[in-house]
Image (cartoon, helix red, strand yellow):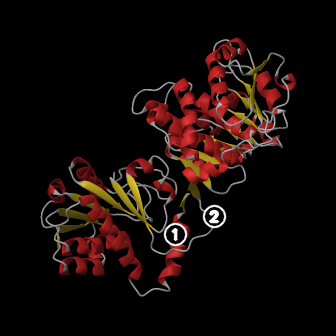
Amino acid sequence: MRTAYSVETVRTAERRLMARLPEGALMQRAAAGLAASCADLLGRVYGSRVVLLVGSGDNGGDALYAGARLARRGAGVTAVPLSPERTHPGGLAALLRAGGRTALGPAEELIERADLVVDGIVGIGGKGGLRPEAARLAEAAERSRAAVVAVDLPSGVDPDTGQVRGPAIRADLTVTFGTHKPGLLIDPARDHAGTVRLIDIGLELPEEPDVEALQHADVARLLPLPGPESDKYRRGVVGVAAGSARYPGAAVLAVAGALHGGAGAVRYVGPAGDAVLARYPETLVSDRGPAKAGRVQAWVVGPGAGDDAATVAEVLEADVPILIDADGLRLAERETVRARTAPTLMTPHAGEAAALLGVSREEVESARLSSARELAARYRATVLLKGSTTLVADAEGGPVRVNATGTSWLATAGSGDVLSGLAGSLLAAGLAPLDAGSVAAYLHGLAGRYASDGAPVGAQDVARAIVRAWRDVRD
């Protein structure tokens, strides 16, 4: 599992470690890892042209010491200090001793000719976008053919939230120290980070992170597996209350996701029963409403429901875990959701989350982490905020789960209905809402990759590929 910690936590750990080490030792550890990563990216260090964009803090010092190591290996290294009077003195001296130099001409021309640009402008203490001079250099680096390496995180992004409030560096590689920072895992900052390489510098961090990201092994441990005594009811039955005369396809796709999600059976309630049976005859269809549909261990409600507030309200009364999606999010009363004693998982996209929070979609997309946390707190529910990086925030607080297994081809009609059915099935199989949402997002993202293989994909293709994603994780 990848974990990420806030700036405050990282700084506390750094202070404790520096108190036990010789002066400057921690920076040398970071610089050694940074230089090695730059060398790997360059391939051939000798004769390469490296430009260091150097801010006034320790971030700039890391860049200078790494530049000195590259210069000793034969690279032509030039430092561009943004605040010459506040440049890290030890790092600058080391660079000059190794044969590096400081910029004499226009920095944009140096960047244009460079093979590698190292972004050491702002460290984890930076807030807001870059200042005008730094923004010009960032734009020059983006225009150039040079590879861009960010030191710890791209300058101009918020390390704790992933927000990008103005101009920021776009890196090909980010070399981060000690631990990931939340912004490296969450869009829009994640998109600026490129590939992220973590360098262990010996930090001792708390057991509970601020953000965590599941990997194959974590998901494999959570997947429900039938035992020798399992039958379809012991494996869990998920109820799906979805679809309408106008949107019967939403019911079909939610059932498709549910059938591939690990539960033993799927009950469908709604007006699209014929369409569901035509595609999935194994579905248990009822026209008597959720309360009389038969025993279930979890409900999915809302996909394609239109204005059927009565069905949504009936499902909300059930004393089992429920997943609320799409129209159900609009129709569910907040106080009713808050009053529920059984677990609730809400799965909005950015537009739906914005409507629930009373803000603009742009605000949610630029502050995804705080939006997910706020929505979970308001509704006392676990919230899965869909997007390029899906976030799952637990109703009780704790680490927010981040998932980035998806592909932009998943931005297609019906994809969210498949995800809802998949997550609902995992709820019925016994997973807690945080785990059900995280595992569903992970499998759904992998299925999207496999189904598309770089080409356009439909929601039914994604549903069919869940089996391959499941096998891949298990194997």
Regarding residue 164, the answer to whether it shows in the image is no
- Which amino acid, mark 2? Glu
Question: Residue flagged by tag 1: what amino acid is it?
Answer: Val
Q: Where is residue 240 in the image (x, y as percent from the top left)?
A: 73, 26
Q: Is residue 38 left or right of residue 179?
A: left
Please provide percent x and percent y for residue 180: 48, 61
Describe residue 428's horizontal placement relative to residue 422 as left or right: right
Give the answer, above or below, for where 143 lies relative to 30.
above
Q: Can you tell which of label 2 and label 1 is closer to the viewer?
A: 2
Residue that appears at 52% across and 35% down: 447
The residue where tag 2 is placed is: 208
Q: Is mark 2 on a helix, strand or loop?
A: loop
In the picture, the quarter occupied by the N terminus is bottom right
| Vertical position of residue 27 compared to residue 170: above or below | below
Residue sitting nearer the eye, 151 or 268: 268
Q: Which residue lies furthest to the right in this view?
A: 292
The residue wearing badge 1 is 10
- In the rendered structure, which disc, 2 or 1, sits on the residue that comes first in sequence? 1
